Image (spheres, helix red, strand yellow):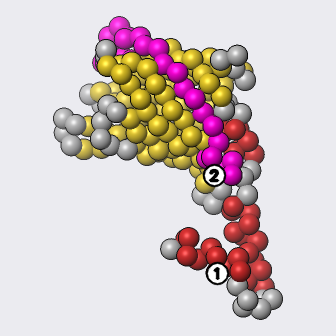
């Protein structure tokens, strides 16, 4: 519906009425990348990753390495990410698309990889006091067939480092299930 509505709003010859002008202005603003997109753009490049997976609370982590390549797509509106590496002795590859919905003022994320047939979707906001983006996702649980909540945080200590953590609920207790440390490749 939105795609059909957009051309008629932008090219409408319905006069110079205020409603048509307001609609054009709203769509133009909605279409134009903002400072949140600049933040996403600042993460473009190739990153070396060190990942720590925690299978359950208190268990020692399994450590893996991977490479993440990120670039902006669709007129600087979305961040396209690919990650390749190994997980549990198997080749791993995943794709993520991140953006910022200016209308709802939320960061959005979709993620899918070769370790499952689901697509994770999440939304979140920038947490200024903690200088991090916090995204709340839903992920399929193959054991129960239900969606489970995941909380993800992304911090940027500096321009060349990122720390992404995922928190999962186990027996009604949230614990860190994944830590990914990114270092920008020079």
Residue 8 disc label: 1
Q: In percent of the image, x 65 and y 28: which residue is there?
A: 45
Q: Residues within 10 Å of mark 2 (few under 14, many from 20)?
A: few
Residue 75 highlighted magenta (yes or no): yes
Q: Which secondary structure lies at badge 2?
A: loop
Q: Quadrant of the C terminus?
A: top right
| Residue 67 vs residue 161, the one in the foreground | 67
Q: Quadrant of residue 60?
A: top left
Q: CA distance from mark 2 to mark 1?
A: 21 Å
User: Which percent across, then down, holds residue 44?
Assistant: 66, 32
Q: In percent of the image, x 49 and y 39: which residue is there?
A: 96
User: Which percent across, then down, holds residue 73?
Assistant: 63, 46
Q: For mark 2, what is the residue?
A: 74
Q: In percent of the image, x 72 and y 70: which residue is there?
A: 26
Identify whether 24 is placed above or below 108. Answer: below
Q: Earlier in the sequence, mark 2 or mark 1?
A: 1
The residue sitting at the right extreme is 16
| Residue 177 vs residue 44, the one in the foreground | 44
Q: Which residues are magenta?
A: 53-78
Identify whether 130 is placed above or below 100. Answer: above
Q: Quadrant of residue 177?
A: top left
Q: Quadrant of residue 32?
A: bottom right
Residue 136 highlighted magenta (yes or no): no
């Amino acid at each position: 519906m939105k795609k059909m509505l957009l051309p008629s709003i932008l090219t409408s010859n319905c006069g110079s009425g205020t409603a048509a002008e307001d609609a054009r202005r709203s769509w133009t603003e909605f279409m134009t990348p903002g400072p949140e997109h600049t933040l996403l753009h600042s993460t473009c490049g190739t990153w070396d990753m060190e990942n720590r997976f925690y299978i359950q609370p208190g268990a020692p982590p399994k450590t893996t390495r991977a490479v993440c390549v990120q670039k902006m797509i669709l007129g600087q509106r979305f961040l396209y990410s690919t990650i390749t590496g190994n997980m549990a002795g198997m080749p791993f590859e995943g794709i993520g698309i991140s953006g910022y919905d200016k209308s709802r003022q939320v960061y959005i994320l979709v993620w899918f990889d070769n370790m499952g047939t689901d697509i994770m979707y999440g939304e979140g906001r920038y947490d200024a006091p903690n200088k991090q983006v916090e995204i709340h996702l839903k992920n399929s649980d193959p054991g129960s067939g239900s969606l489970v909540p995941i909380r993800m945080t992304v911090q940027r200590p500096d321009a060349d480092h990122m720390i992404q953590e995922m928190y999962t609920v186990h027996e009604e207790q949230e614990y860190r299930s994944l830590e990914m440390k990114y270092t920008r490749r020079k």
